[in-house]
Image (tube, rainbow, N blue to C red):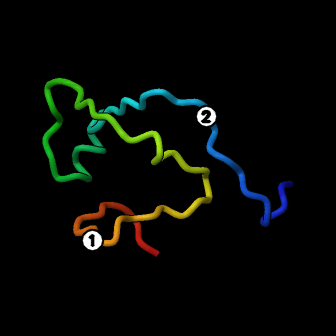
Amino acid sequence: MVDRNVRIAEPVAEVGKMICVGLNYADHAAESGMDVPPEPVLFFKATSSIIGPNDNVVLPPKSEKVIGKSS
């Protein structure tokens, strides 16, 4: 068992580009209130957005639309 005070880092290193696929299954589209697209939705994410499994998600100060679970 890992001590709770030990930070577990992100599971990847030296990422050059991060290409993501959105709405890639019907339930994801449904929970987003969108139709399933005819083709995969591809987008890039900044590699600085890669965090460890228990790290806090830091939002820009003027964020207006954030999708996800809030605590």
State the residue at coordinates (62%, 44%).
10
**x and y percentages locating residue 54 in the rendered image:** 62, 59
* Residue depicted at x 61% and y 50%: 52
**33 lies above or below 39:** below
Which labelled disc corresponds to residue 12? 2
**How many numbered dots are placed on residues in this image?**
2
Which quadrant of the structure image shows residue 70? Answer: bottom left
**Is the residue marked by circle 2 packed among few (<14), some (14-19), or many (20+) residues within 10 Å?**
few
Does residue 25 appear anywhere in the picture?
no
Q: Which residue is mark 1?
A: 62
Which disc, if any, is residue 19?
none
Is residue 10 depicted above or below 36 in this figure?
below
CA neighbours of label 1 inside 10 A, class few (<14), some (14 to 19), many (20+): few
At label 2, the amino acid type is: Val
| Residue 1: quarter of image | bottom right
Residue 34: x %, y % from top left: 15, 46
For image coordinates 30% across by 61% down, the residue present is 67
